[in-house]
Amino acid sequence: MLSWLVLAASLLLCLVLLYLDGRRRERAVLRDWELALTPKGERALRSMEHKTSSELALVDLTYTRAREAQDIGHKAEALRLLDVGCRMIEEYCPTMLRSLAAMAVLSRMVAAMAPVSPMRPRRFELRPLTNLAYLNRFIHHFLVTTAERFRLKVYILARGFETLGHVVIRSTARVKEADATDKEPEATGQEWRLIESARHDVHSLSQESLETFRVLLVSMAAERRE
Amino acid sequence: MKLLVVAGLLLAPAILAGLARRRLYRLCYSFPAYLLAVWIGELLILAWPERFYRWSFWQIKETAYAVLKLATALELGSLAFKAFPGARQRAKSLALLVLLATLGALLLEPVTSTDFRSLALELQPRLANGTALLFASVWALVFWYHIPLHRLHRAILRGFVPYLLIFTTGMRLLASLGRDIQHAAAGADSIAYVAMLAYWAWEAWRKEPEDTASSPVLRRLQPWRDRL
């Protein structure tokens, strides 16, 4: 019976490996290694840093204008800008998720990873993100290698961006819904506060991601010197 | 069935010639050794069946093939992870674990057979399954650590893992269900085996793209490319 189970598991593993092999492109693997082992990678990550800060500045500007429009009673303009800001974050989060996924792959290619610090809960205003940061701090101490700690942080950051995207979409929808049904301003106040917190936290998450990038850069630079 | 045997006999030297032509035999010495052993073994049976078509020879040749397959898996692992110290350490641990588990399956798992022939039928699939898992562990680590593979190494993994599992399944069915499915199991095994050889022959003869072969990064990651 045991040998049949082992055989079944082996067949399943074989199918998974064949599937992964079908998806794998050797050229893409080599390109990733070129990123890790040549200054090309450093340049790519630096440009990502610039892109991140400019996108966040745009998100900030849009939400500030939306808040101003809301405060002076231009509801239609406030909603339009809120919608634009929401779409910006909606697009920004998957970009960051892709970058984090690439970082996780690169981290496996680096022989020795520089130490990474866990996320700081005080940096966040949204409750789910604070909890994620506490979770990161907690599990961080149970992991032995710096590579494992790095990948944990990358995983938590990715979950953070996903959560943030959901919060922004939900709160924007509620603000629009409240406006359509002519609810009291207090009803939307809570959602506006959540959006403000999300705006704050997108900065914190990006900051944490950039710090993680830097750790990867240091590790990759050490790899190149070897 | 005879046609498949002849096809196997023609394909094995074709692969060896391809490996020699492209000097690919230098990238995994156990692999051509395995192909040569298989070719000689099958040729002897076809040429002198009255002398070599017997259980004692079958046992000797299958043991030799199994040892060479294990050697191929270990050599492949050591080459693929040569430039990656972290991955190499993990690969060593995993290989040791698989080898110990295979040894445990061979020695500790109870055998029901009493005669030599049934015992061989019972033990061969355990060894083949262990070898397949050894190849699979190398393959899985290659994916996990994002390690670039030479096309020949990839072809060996792509060929051996499914074929060994088909072989194992056939042998297990044969051991459990008896002679009723002997022809079906042997047919499936032969088809899978010839398909694997045909794929290897194609890989051995096709030309390598120039741009990837000359990349300095690739030369650093695959130091054994200098052998070519």
Image: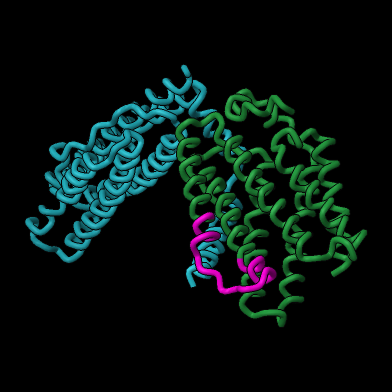
Chain colours: A cyan, B green
Magenta run includes residue A171:
no
In the image, what residue occupies the spot 76% across and 43% down? B33
Rendered residue at 64%/44% (across/down): B71
Nearer-the-camera pick, B126 or B195: B126
Q: Please name whichever residue, B5 or A41, is drawn nearer the observer in this view of the structure.
A: B5
Write down the region rendered in magenta: B103-122
Compared to B119, does A156 lie above or below?
above
In the image shown, does A91 or B110 lie closer to the viewer?
B110
What residue do we see at 44% from left, 30% from top?
Answer: A110
Residues B170 and B141: in front is B170
Judged left or right of residue A79, residue B47 is right
| Residue at figure coordinates x 73%, y 69% from the top left | B188
Return the residue found at the far bottom: B180
Quadrant in the rendering for residue B221: top right
Q: Is residue B135 left or right of residue A146?
A: right
Residue B82, given in percent of the width and then of the height, sits at 56, 31
Q: Quadrant of residue A60?
A: top left
